[in-house]
Image (tube, rainbow, N blue to C red):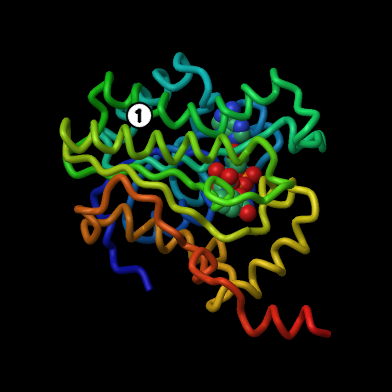
Amino acid sequence: MAKNVLQGKKGIIFGALDQNSIAWKAAERIYDEGGVFTLSNAPVAMRMGKINELGEKCKAVVIPADATSVEDLENLFTKSMETLGGKLDFILHSIGMSPNVRKGKDYGDLNYDWYLKTLDISGVSFHKVMQVAEKKDAMNEWGSILALTYIAAQRTFPDYADMAQAKAVLESVARSYGYRFARLKKVRVNTISQSPTMTTAGSGVPGFDVFFDYSDKMSPLGNASAADCANYIVAMFSDYTRMVTMQNLFHDGGFSNSGITEELVQKLSK
Ligand SMILES: NC(=O)c1ccc[n+]([C@@H]2O[C@H](COP(=O)([O-])OP(=O)(O)OC[C@H]3O[C@@H](n4cnc5c(N)ncnc54)[C@H](O)[C@@H]3O)[C@@H](O)[C@H]2O)c1
Protein backbone atom coordinates (compact mmCIF):
# COMPACT_ATOMS: atom_id res chain seq x y z
CA MET A 1 0.00 0.00 0.00
CA ALA A 2 3.01 2.32 0.46
CA LYS A 3 3.10 5.17 -2.08
CA ASN A 4 6.03 7.16 -0.67
CA VAL A 5 3.76 10.09 0.14
CA LEU A 6 6.15 11.16 2.93
CA GLN A 7 9.35 10.88 0.89
CA GLY A 8 11.86 13.50 2.05
CA LYS A 9 9.87 14.50 5.12
CA LYS A 10 11.47 14.65 8.56
CA GLY A 11 9.88 14.61 11.98
CA ILE A 12 9.63 13.66 15.64
CA ILE A 13 7.29 10.95 16.96
CA PHE A 14 6.41 11.03 20.66
CA GLY A 15 4.78 8.21 22.61
CA ALA A 16 5.67 4.80 21.16
CA LEU A 17 5.77 2.51 24.21
CA ASP A 18 5.11 -0.95 22.75
CA GLN A 19 3.65 -2.59 19.62
CA ASN A 20 0.11 -1.63 20.66
CA SER A 21 0.83 2.10 20.89
CA ILE A 22 -0.79 4.29 18.28
CA ALA A 23 2.58 6.05 17.87
CA TRP A 24 4.26 2.69 17.21
CA LYS A 25 1.88 1.85 14.35
CA ALA A 26 2.21 5.41 13.05
CA ALA A 27 6.03 5.17 13.06
CA GLU A 28 5.92 1.93 11.05
CA ARG A 29 3.56 3.45 8.46
CA ILE A 30 5.48 6.73 8.23
CA TYR A 31 8.69 4.77 7.68
CA ASP A 32 6.97 2.70 4.95
CA GLU A 33 5.94 5.94 3.26
CA GLY A 34 9.50 7.28 3.14
CA GLY A 35 9.42 9.58 6.20
CA VAL A 36 12.47 9.83 8.49
CA PHE A 37 12.21 10.71 12.15
CA THR A 38 13.53 10.55 15.68
CA LEU A 39 11.55 8.72 18.37
CA SER A 40 11.02 10.10 21.85
CA ASN A 41 9.45 9.01 25.09
CA ALA A 42 9.75 9.77 28.81
CA PRO A 43 12.98 8.34 30.29
CA VAL A 44 11.00 6.04 32.61
CA ALA A 45 8.91 4.68 29.72
CA MET A 46 12.06 3.95 27.73
CA ARG A 47 13.14 1.53 30.41
CA MET A 48 9.74 -0.20 30.53
CA GLY A 49 8.93 -0.22 26.83
CA LYS A 50 10.51 -1.52 23.67
CA ILE A 51 11.17 1.70 21.81
CA ASN A 52 14.73 0.69 20.87
CA GLU A 53 13.31 -2.25 18.90
CA LEU A 54 11.18 0.20 16.92
CA GLY A 55 14.19 2.47 16.47
CA GLU A 56 16.15 -0.35 14.86
CA LYS A 57 13.26 -1.33 12.64
CA CYS A 58 12.67 2.23 11.40
CA LYS A 59 16.33 3.32 11.43
CA ALA A 60 15.36 6.04 13.90
CA VAL A 61 17.48 7.52 16.67
CA VAL A 62 15.75 7.36 20.06
CA ILE A 63 16.04 10.50 22.23
CA PRO A 64 14.54 10.54 25.74
CA ALA A 65 12.46 13.55 26.80
CA ASP A 66 9.90 14.12 29.49
CA ALA A 67 7.35 16.13 27.50
CA THR A 68 6.63 18.32 30.53
CA SER A 69 10.28 19.48 30.68
CA VAL A 70 11.11 22.41 28.38
CA GLU A 71 14.81 21.65 28.87
CA ASP A 72 14.34 18.05 27.69
CA LEU A 73 12.33 19.26 24.71
CA GLU A 74 14.98 21.81 23.74
CA ASN A 75 17.60 19.08 23.76
CA LEU A 76 15.30 16.79 21.75
CA PHE A 77 14.65 19.39 19.03
CA THR A 78 18.33 20.34 18.74
CA LYS A 79 19.45 16.71 18.51
CA SER A 80 16.63 15.77 16.13
CA MET A 81 17.57 18.52 13.66
CA GLU A 82 21.24 17.49 13.89
CA THR A 83 20.43 13.81 13.38
CA LEU A 84 17.97 14.35 10.56
CA GLY A 85 20.07 17.03 8.87
CA GLY A 86 17.58 19.87 8.84
CA LYS A 87 14.25 21.28 9.94
CA LEU A 88 11.12 19.25 10.54
CA ASP A 89 8.00 18.63 8.47
CA PHE A 90 5.92 16.72 11.03
CA ILE A 91 5.48 16.17 14.76
CA LEU A 92 3.25 13.52 16.35
CA HIS A 93 2.25 14.12 19.99
CA SER A 94 0.85 10.76 21.14
CA ILE A 95 1.14 11.29 24.88
CA GLY A 96 -1.37 10.78 27.67
CA MET A 97 -1.28 9.88 31.33
CA SER A 98 -3.36 10.59 34.43
CA PRO A 99 -2.03 9.56 37.83
CA ASN A 100 -5.62 9.87 39.15
CA VAL A 101 -6.97 7.42 36.54
CA ARG A 102 -4.01 5.12 37.00
CA LYS A 103 -4.56 4.99 40.76
CA GLY A 104 -8.36 4.59 40.41
CA LYS A 105 -9.28 7.91 42.04
CA ASP A 106 -12.96 8.79 41.89
CA TYR A 107 -13.83 12.12 40.19
CA GLY A 108 -15.13 13.42 43.53
CA ASP A 109 -11.90 12.50 45.31
CA LEU A 110 -9.15 13.69 42.99
CA ASN A 111 -5.63 14.39 44.19
CA TYR A 112 -4.97 17.95 42.96
CA ASP A 113 -1.21 17.56 42.58
CA TRP A 114 -1.94 14.63 40.31
CA TYR A 115 -4.68 16.61 38.53
CA LEU A 116 -2.09 19.27 37.61
CA LYS A 117 0.26 16.51 36.44
CA THR A 118 -2.48 15.10 34.21
CA LEU A 119 -3.04 18.52 32.66
CA ASP A 120 0.69 19.09 32.20
CA ILE A 121 1.53 15.68 30.70
CA SER A 122 -1.57 15.26 28.54
CA GLY A 123 -2.47 18.85 27.60
CA VAL A 124 0.07 21.61 28.32
CA SER A 125 2.95 19.49 26.97
CA PHE A 126 1.50 20.02 23.48
CA HIS A 127 1.98 23.77 23.94
CA LYS A 128 5.51 23.20 25.25
CA VAL A 129 6.39 21.08 22.21
CA MET A 130 5.18 23.78 19.81
CA GLN A 131 6.69 26.69 21.73
CA VAL A 132 10.09 24.97 21.68
CA ALA A 133 9.63 24.19 17.96
CA GLU A 134 8.83 27.85 17.27
CA LYS A 135 11.70 29.26 19.35
CA LYS A 136 14.18 26.91 17.70
CA ASP A 137 12.69 27.72 14.29
CA ALA A 138 12.47 23.95 13.85
CA MET A 139 9.56 23.68 11.40
CA ASN A 140 9.66 23.84 7.62
CA GLU A 141 6.91 25.72 5.80
CA TRP A 142 3.79 23.61 5.20
CA GLY A 143 4.70 21.30 8.06
CA SER A 144 2.03 19.35 9.97
CA ILE A 145 1.67 18.89 13.74
CA LEU A 146 -0.79 16.41 15.27
CA ALA A 147 -1.91 15.32 18.72
CA LEU A 148 -4.22 12.47 19.67
CA THR A 149 -7.36 13.14 21.66
CA TYR A 150 -10.64 11.56 22.75
CA ILE A 151 -14.31 12.60 22.58
CA ALA A 152 -14.44 12.82 26.40
CA ALA A 153 -13.31 16.44 25.79
CA GLN A 154 -16.84 17.15 24.48
CA ARG A 155 -19.02 14.57 26.24
CA THR A 156 -18.93 13.00 29.67
CA PHE A 157 -17.43 9.55 30.09
CA PRO A 158 -17.26 9.20 33.88
CA ASP A 159 -14.27 6.85 34.15
CA TYR A 160 -12.12 9.16 32.02
CA ALA A 161 -11.98 11.48 35.08
CA ASP A 162 -9.49 14.38 34.82
CA MET A 163 -8.26 13.22 31.39
CA ALA A 164 -11.42 14.87 30.00
CA GLN A 165 -10.13 18.29 31.04
CA ALA A 166 -6.64 17.49 29.76
CA LYS A 167 -8.05 16.63 26.33
CA ALA A 168 -10.11 19.85 26.32
CA VAL A 169 -6.88 21.78 26.97
CA LEU A 170 -5.08 19.82 24.25
CA GLU A 171 -7.75 20.56 21.64
CA SER A 172 -7.87 24.22 22.59
CA VAL A 173 -4.07 24.51 22.33
CA ALA A 174 -4.30 23.01 18.81
CA ARG A 175 -6.66 25.83 17.76
CA SER A 176 -4.66 28.64 19.39
CA TYR A 177 -1.23 27.43 18.25
CA GLY A 178 -2.72 26.41 14.90
CA TYR A 179 -3.63 30.04 14.29
CA ARG A 180 -0.16 31.21 15.31
CA PHE A 181 1.82 28.63 13.35
CA ALA A 182 -0.30 29.16 10.21
CA ARG A 183 0.55 32.87 10.25
CA LEU A 184 4.20 32.30 11.10
CA LYS A 185 5.12 29.38 8.88
CA LYS A 186 2.04 27.95 7.12
CA VAL A 187 2.32 25.02 9.55
CA ARG A 188 -0.94 23.22 10.31
CA VAL A 189 -1.94 21.95 13.76
CA ASN A 190 -4.76 19.48 14.36
CA THR A 191 -5.99 16.88 16.82
CA ILE A 192 -7.26 13.44 15.86
CA SER A 193 -10.08 12.20 18.07
CA GLN A 194 -9.57 8.44 18.01
CA SER A 195 -11.88 5.53 18.90
CA PRO A 196 -11.11 3.57 22.08
CA THR A 197 -8.02 1.50 21.24
CA MET A 198 -6.45 -1.45 23.08
CA THR A 199 -3.21 0.14 24.29
CA THR A 200 -1.52 0.66 27.66
CA ALA A 201 -3.08 4.14 28.06
CA GLY A 202 -6.49 2.98 26.79
CA SER A 203 -6.84 -0.11 28.92
CA GLY A 204 -5.77 1.89 31.99
CA VAL A 205 -9.30 3.36 32.04
CA PRO A 206 -11.56 1.30 34.36
CA GLY A 207 -14.12 -0.91 32.56
CA PHE A 208 -12.31 -0.40 29.26
CA ASP A 209 -13.43 -3.73 27.72
CA VAL A 210 -17.13 -2.92 28.14
CA PHE A 211 -16.55 0.58 26.96
CA PHE A 212 -14.63 -0.62 23.89
CA ASP A 213 -17.50 -2.97 22.99
CA TYR A 214 -20.15 -0.26 23.49
CA SER A 215 -18.21 2.16 21.29
CA ASP A 216 -17.76 -0.51 18.62
CA LYS A 217 -21.52 -1.11 18.49
CA MET A 218 -22.29 2.61 18.56
CA SER A 219 -20.05 3.27 15.53
CA PRO A 220 -21.60 2.38 12.15
CA LEU A 221 -18.14 1.43 10.82
CA GLY A 222 -17.00 -0.06 14.15
CA ASN A 223 -14.09 1.24 16.21
CA ALA A 224 -11.14 2.59 14.26
CA SER A 225 -8.02 0.54 15.06
CA ALA A 226 -4.53 1.86 15.79
CA ALA A 227 -3.51 0.72 12.29
CA ASP A 228 -6.37 2.75 10.77
CA CYS A 229 -5.25 5.71 12.85
CA ALA A 230 -1.69 5.33 11.55
CA ASN A 231 -3.02 5.61 7.99
CA TYR A 232 -4.93 8.76 8.88
CA ILE A 233 -1.79 10.22 10.47
CA VAL A 234 0.13 9.53 7.23
CA ALA A 235 -2.59 11.38 5.29
CA MET A 236 -2.39 14.33 7.70
CA PHE A 237 1.40 14.52 7.36
CA SER A 238 1.24 14.28 3.55
CA ASP A 239 0.87 17.19 1.13
CA TYR A 240 -2.72 16.11 0.40
CA THR A 241 -4.00 17.87 3.53
CA ARG A 242 -2.12 21.17 3.43
CA MET A 243 -5.14 23.41 4.05
CA VAL A 244 -6.54 21.48 7.04
CA THR A 245 -5.74 23.26 10.28
CA MET A 246 -7.10 24.14 13.75
CA GLN A 247 -9.47 21.14 13.56
CA ASN A 248 -10.47 18.37 15.89
CA LEU A 249 -10.79 15.51 13.39
CA PHE A 250 -12.98 12.60 14.45
CA HIS A 251 -11.49 9.26 13.48
CA ASP A 252 -14.07 7.06 15.12
CA GLY A 253 -16.10 5.02 12.62
CA GLY A 254 -18.99 7.49 12.93
CA PHE A 255 -19.38 7.31 16.73
CA SER A 256 -19.43 11.10 17.23
CA ASN A 257 -22.49 11.58 15.00
CA SER A 258 -24.49 8.51 16.03
CA GLY A 259 -27.50 8.78 18.34
CA ILE A 260 -28.18 5.05 18.55
CA THR A 261 -27.45 2.08 16.29
CA GLU A 262 -29.47 -1.03 15.49
CA GLU A 263 -26.66 -3.19 16.86
CA LEU A 264 -26.86 -1.49 20.24
CA VAL A 265 -30.68 -1.70 20.32
CA GLN A 266 -30.45 -5.44 19.60
CA LYS A 267 -27.85 -5.95 22.32
CA LEU A 268 -29.82 -3.98 24.92
CA SER A 269 -33.18 -5.62 24.10
CA LYS A 270 -31.80 -9.13 24.72
N1 LIG B 1 -6.12 4.10 23.56
C1 LIG B 1 -7.22 4.78 23.45
O1 LIG B 1 -8.34 4.30 23.69
C2 LIG B 1 -7.15 6.22 22.97
C3 LIG B 1 -8.30 6.82 22.42
C4 LIG B 1 -8.21 8.16 22.02
C5 LIG B 1 -7.02 8.86 22.16
N2 LIG B 1 -5.93 8.22 22.70
C6 LIG B 1 -4.69 8.99 22.87
O2 LIG B 1 -3.68 8.47 22.05
C7 LIG B 1 -2.42 8.86 22.59
C8 LIG B 1 -1.48 7.66 22.64
O3 LIG B 1 -1.94 6.71 23.57
P1 LIG B 1 -1.96 5.16 23.28
O4 LIG B 1 -3.37 4.74 23.36
O5 LIG B 1 -1.16 4.81 22.08
O6 LIG B 1 -1.28 4.56 24.61
P2 LIG B 1 0.26 4.34 25.03
O7 LIG B 1 0.20 4.05 26.48
O8 LIG B 1 0.88 3.34 24.15
O9 LIG B 1 0.93 5.77 24.76
C9 LIG B 1 0.93 6.82 25.70
C10 LIG B 1 2.34 7.35 25.73
O10 LIG B 1 2.48 8.54 26.53
C11 LIG B 1 3.80 8.48 27.04
N3 LIG B 1 4.02 9.43 28.14
C12 LIG B 1 3.42 9.43 29.36
N4 LIG B 1 3.94 10.42 30.13
C13 LIG B 1 4.86 11.07 29.35
C14 LIG B 1 5.73 12.17 29.57
N5 LIG B 1 5.76 12.83 30.72
N6 LIG B 1 6.58 12.56 28.57
C15 LIG B 1 6.58 11.89 27.38
N7 LIG B 1 5.76 10.85 27.12
C16 LIG B 1 4.92 10.43 28.09
C17 LIG B 1 3.90 7.03 27.51
O11 LIG B 1 5.20 6.63 27.83
C18 LIG B 1 3.32 6.32 26.30
O12 LIG B 1 4.32 6.02 25.35
C19 LIG B 1 -2.70 9.49 23.97
O13 LIG B 1 -2.78 10.89 23.83
C20 LIG B 1 -4.09 8.93 24.27
O14 LIG B 1 -4.80 9.72 25.20
C21 LIG B 1 -5.96 6.92 23.08
Q: Between residue 20 and residue 265, name the one nearer to us.
A: 265
Residue 231 screen position, x and y as percent: 42, 63
User: Which type of secondary structure does the marked residue at label 1 adopt?
Assistant: helix
Identify the residue shown where x is 36% and y is 58%. Answer: 234
Where 250 falls versus 133 (above or below)? Answer: below
If the picture is divided into quarters, which one holds ligand 1?
Answer: top right
Percent of width and height locating residue 86: 23, 32
Which residue is tagged 1? 130
State whether residue 19 appears in this view: no
The three-letter amino acid code for the residue at tag 1 is Met
Would residue 149 be visible to someone looking at this image?
Answer: yes
Q: Residue at x 62, y 29 (%)?
A: 118
Task: Left or right? Give the position of 25 relative to 8.
Answer: right
Q: Quadrant of the N terminus?
A: bottom left
Decide which of 138, 212 is in the foreground and name it.
212
Q: Quadrant of residue 38?
A: top left
Residue 19 relative to residue 237: left or right: right
Other-residue count near label 1 (Cα within 10 Å), few / some / many at <14 / 14–19 / ≥20: many
